[in-house]
């Protein structure tokens, strides 16, 4: 899972789908602005996924046009879904995020275990009692 480096919150899948090397997303828990940390990994995943998808797509669409066999069209749709799913899983596993903007709640910090807001001076979470990092 892609997590926020500040609060440890798992980012939503819909946020991970649209993330690129230039865009920023906002953590839903601590409101930090996040950007991709390892941009080379993200570029490789997107480039290889797009290249493989384009090659297989052209191959299957051309085979469908030539033969008029619907099997190629269904195979194209399944391969497109498979490539999208693999790219999403690779993004969730290997892409890391970094904080690029300060959150709006500067006087508080968040427990990485339960997500509760705590004051900066507290050593233990007020909700779950675990030690604050």
Image (spheres, grey):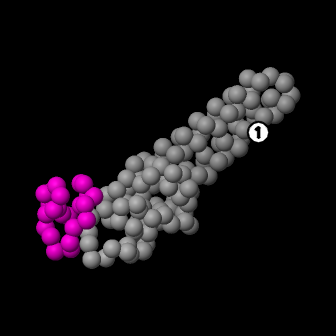
Q: Residue at x 80, y 29 (%)?
A: 63
Count of marks overlaid on the render: 1
Looking at the image, can residue 69 be seen? Answer: yes
Left or right, residue 36 beside residue 50: left
Quadrant hosting residue 56: top right
Q: Residue at x 59, y 52 (%)?
A: 46
Q: Residue at x 42, y 58 (%)?
A: 96
State yes or no: residue 127 in magenta.
yes
Q: Nearer the viewer, residue 128 or 36?
A: 128
State yes or no: residue 125 in magenta.
yes
Query: Where does residue 121 sit, x and y in percent of width and height?
Result: 16, 74
Left or right, residue 115 beside residue 128: right
| Image quarter hosting the C terminus | bottom left
Q: Under tag 1, what secondary structure?
A: helix
Left or right, residue 133 beside residue 20: left
Q: Dot 1, crowdedness within 10 Å: few (<14), some or many (≥20)?
A: few
Q: Nearer the viewer, residue 108 or 82?
A: 108
Q: Does 1 sit above or below residue 122? A: above
Q: Residue at x 21, y 67 (%)?
A: 118
Query: Where does residue 40 sit, x and y in percent of width and height?
Result: 52, 59
Query: Where does residue 60 sit, x and y in percent of width and height?
Result: 75, 32
Chief secondary structure of the magenta portion: loop
Q: Does 85 sit above or below residue 5? A: above
Query: Where does residue 42 sit, x and y in percent of width and height?
Result: 52, 56
Q: Which residue is mark 1?
A: 58
Q: Which residues are magenta?
A: 111-133
Q: Does 103 sit above or below residue 7? A: below
């Amino acid at each position: 899972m892609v997590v926020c480096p500040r609060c440890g919150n798992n980012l939503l899948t819909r946020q991970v789908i649209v993330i690129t090397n230039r865009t920023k997303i906002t953590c839903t828990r601590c409101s930090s602005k996040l950007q991709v940390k390892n941009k080379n990994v993200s570029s490789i995943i997107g480039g290889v996924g797009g290249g493989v998808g384009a090659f297989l797509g052209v191959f299957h669409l051309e085979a469908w046009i030539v033969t008029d066999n619907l099997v190629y069209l269904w195979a194209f749709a399944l391969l497109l879904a498979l490539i999208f799913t693999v790219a999403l899983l690779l993004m969730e596993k290997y892409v890391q995020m970094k904080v690029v903007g300060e959150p709006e709640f500067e006087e508080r910090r968040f427990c990485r275990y339960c997500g509760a807001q705590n004051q900066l001076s507290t050593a233990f979470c007020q909700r779950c009692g675990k030690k604050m990092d």
